[in-house]
Image (cartoon, rainbow, N blue to C red):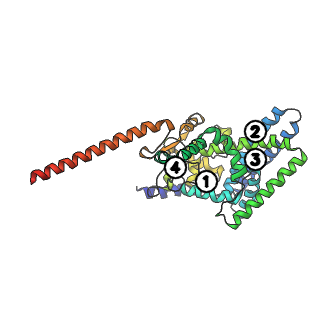
Amino acid sequence: MTDREKTLQLRKAITPYAKSDTKKSIMQIVNTIPPLIALWIAAYIVLPYTTLGSIALSVIAAGFVVRTFIIFHDCTHGSFFKNKKANDIVGLITGVITLFSYEKWKREHMIHHASSSNLDKRGIGDIWVMTVDEYLKASKWQRFCYRAYRNPLVMFGLGPLYLVLVSSRFNHKDAKKKERINTYISNLLIVALATGIILVTNIQSFILVHGVTMFVAGALGIWLFFIQHTFEDSYFENENEWDYVKAAVEGSSYYKLPIILQWVTGNIGFHHVHHLAPRIPNYKLEEAHKKTPPLQRATTITIKTSLQSLRYKLYYEPQKTFVTFKDIKGLVAHDSKIKTSLETIKTSVHAAKSSKHLYER
């Protein structure tokens, strides 16, 4: 069977799962958003009596924000409801709750899906990845910026703040009118909601409760996105060799999580399935994975093994693997030896040909 036939067979096998179930979608909204609101109300109520208790409730609420984001995420793919308008309305609402602009994130995420693992099309909707060769050719300032960006304290500490306060609040220069208006509306609704909460409580309480919730949720979101595309043998190729199916199944991991965390994260651990077929709603990803044998060959990572990915900083094209900053010297020395050997062989061959030519004369 050719690769094309295998691809067609795989896509045919997962097609039945790419259909939303209205009852399941509504049930997911019911078991996600009301509990989130209840946790927030409880956190505000107990705050005057126990700060630690309020913080604990805010942290738990962060898990429900992540789950709300998965609903938002499915809406951007048009997979949560059959009706486009329903997806857009729920997407706008869940975007306000999670502090993301619906149309802006939708466009950027579509670009991510269309170019994930493509070395020639990095830059939009991705974690910043440099190859070893690019890093060696970069200026000191570029290296400093990259090292800072890949530092866990920056990525998971400052990252959430930048994501919700800056990146999601402003449109790109090439944004269309619809996207710009949607961002303005989202921002106004977020400001109105925040103002309402502050008037009912106070600004200190708002910063503590919502600040803790959104910071933890943002850090978790960045971690999930990072870990599901950054593992040792992750697939990356240049445009002329890039393949959509390989990028999905080999460039995205299966993050095997404990059942409670799988529920909280809306099955996004089955990321390889999602990248192969974005129209599959989150509540059908696990079933698609279990009933489609080829998908079970995706790289599986656990919480323990996923922590190793924090070491990986650069992509080494010759070996098609992620490496650490410490590996660079060894790789440069290795490449230098190979280059020297090839040059020696080339010189020897040239000398042999010259000797042969003189002998024949």
Q: Nearer the viewer, residue 86 or 131?
A: 131
Point out the residue furthest to the front here: 140
Q: Which residue is mark 2?
A: 60
> Does the CB distance between marks 4 and 3 fall below 8 Å?
no
> Upstream in the sequence, badge 4 or badge 1?
1
Instruction: Give amino acid for label 2.
Output: Ile
Give the x, y percent position of residue 342: 30, 45
> Upstream in the sequence, badge 1 or badge 2?
2
Q: Which residue is mark 4?
A: 249
Neighbor class of circle 1 (other Cα within 10 Å; few <14, some 14-19, many 20+) is some
> Upstream in the sequence, badge 4 or badge 3?
3
Q: Nearer the viewer, residue 316 or 232?
A: 316
Callout 4: SS: helix
Neighbor class of circle 4 (other Cα within 10 Å; few <14, some 14-19, many 20+) is many
- Image quadrant where residue 156 sits: top right
Neighbor class of circle 3 (other Cα within 10 Å; few <14, some 14-19, many 20+) is many
**Which quadrant: the N terminus?**
bottom left
Instruction: Give amino acid for label 1.
Output: Gly
Mark number for residue 32? 3
Left or right of 132? Residue 52 is right
Measured Cα–Cα span from mark 4 to mark 3: 29 Å
- Seen at 53% across and 55% down, the residue is 13
Left or right of 83? Residue 135 is left
Q: Which residue is mark 1?
A: 125
Measured Cα–Cα span from mark 2 to mark 3: 12 Å
Mark number for residue 10? none
Question: Which-is-in-front pick, marks 4 and 1?
Answer: 1
